[in-house]
Image: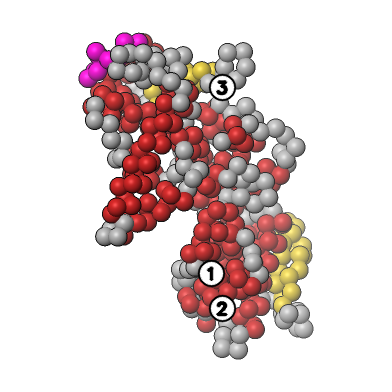
Amino acid sequence: MKYLQKTVQINRDGRKVKTAVIANRSTAALHLPATAYLINKSMKGLKIKSVEKYASIILSLIEEVEFDPEIDSLDDLNDSTMSAYLQKVLYEERGISGNSLNQHKQTLSNFFSLAFDMGYLKKPNRFTYRISDAAELAQAKSQGRERSLDPYRLSEKYIPAKQFNLLLSFEASKNPYVRARNEIILRLGYEVGLRASEVTSFENLSIAAIKKSINDSEEKKLNELELGILGKGGNGGKQRTVVIPPALKRKIQRFIKANKKHLKTHLICDVDGKELGSCYSSTIFNRAKKNLIRKLDLEKDINHHSKGNVERWIANTGWTFHALRHSFATNLAMEVISGNKKLAKVYVQERLGHEYARTTLIYCHFAAVLTENIIVQDQLSEEIENTLNRPIDRELVNV
């Protein structure tokens, strides 16, 4: 190996900073683009373990460039050579996991962009980082899971918004009341995070409570609704407050107004006003999923989008009604870590009714993976590692 990675301490702006550098083994000359990038990360407060990890990823690519006689520098790399490096060297020769492959892609993309902005590279980040379908599948299955960071395979249970909306279009009940009610049931899972039994239980979602919440929201000039929900737990269940977003609030208001003859005491009920079974929510999810797969399977030979969608729904066996709750938690966590809304991580814990903070940290880490936020991933990784011996919410293990 021509280059080596070394951890050093430097003095910058009057303070001592621990960082990593990459240097020539023979001459000790620094590899300027890589070292500048690593020092930049350290100066921004990144932990030394994370900086060392980034250094090893960049060093790996540098060594491959040095080994190739047709490539003189990082600026000589093109899209095909980068894809070959990811596919042939990392995935096939070294057999790295999908999650590690994803981290290589994210780190290298960030490195090329920042090193160019700092003037150490002549060419910007110009790569698509393409890999084979098999490698993409391995990466998707491992995404968000490294050691114990995604022990519950959230990466296989998260349903993107486009796929959820597609599922809604296949709720095919002929009765207009049932069709509208079933759409609200599915939305209560995806947009509010209710469990299947919570949606149908007459302990929750009474018409009286909803109307009171509507009046309260109008007095406070709020667009969403806040409702108390009785969930799982001992001593009769655990209470939590959920937030119904504006669009779903309006849909519920119209539903109540149009179906007074069916709705006697509760929002979710049978056509005669009686309580539905605790498994009903899962039943309508599975029925819509079967309709989707059956109808799109017939179209797949003439419609490319139908083929792609049906393959996703067949492959993702973890897409169940409870996956809607996982998806809600992940989407909420993405809002928290993005900073678009001034929300603390505890907000996710409160809205989901998680007893243990570590469960919430796992969702936030997975959200950081989906949004490719490397810095937040590393921060949360450390927090999760510090809670490895603490309990977690068991529902994640059992579904």
Tell me: residue 54, above or below residue 185.
below
Residue 347 horizontal side relative to residue 161, left or right: right
Q: Nearer the viewer, residue 247 or 48?
A: 247
Q: Is residue 252 above or below residue 158?
A: above
Q: Quadrant of residue 225?
A: top left
Q: Is residue 34 magenta?
A: no
Question: Which quarter of the picture shows residue 70?
Answer: bottom right
Q: Of helix, strand and loop, which one carries label 2?
A: helix
Residue beneath disc 3: 232
Judge from the rendering whether residue 294 lies leftward or rightward of residue 201; answer left or right: left
Amino acid bearing label 3: Lys
Residue at screen point 31% across, 10% down: 264
In screen coordinates, is 91 left or right of 307? right
Residue topped by disc 2:
74
For the point 72% across and 34% down, which residue is it?
A: 390
Would you say the residues marked 2 and 1 are in contact, meaning their CB atoms lie under 8 Å apart? yes
Q: What's the distance in space between the residues labelled 1 and 3, CA to CA?
A: 48 Å
For residue 121, the mark is: none
Magenta part of the chain? 257-265
Residue at (38% x, 28% y) in the render: 185
Q: Earlier in the sequence, mark 2 or mark 1?
A: 2
Q: Amino acid at mark 1?
A: Phe
Q: Is residue 332 above or below residue 206?
A: below
Give the structural element (helix, strand or loop) at label 1. helix
Residue 387 percent coordinates (x, y): 71, 38
Task: Kindly report which numbered mark, 2 or 3, lies closer to the viewer in this rendering.
Answer: 3
Residue 174 on image: x %, y %: 24, 30
Q: Which mark is residue 112?
A: 1
Q: Position of residue 398 (x, y in %)?
A: 60, 34
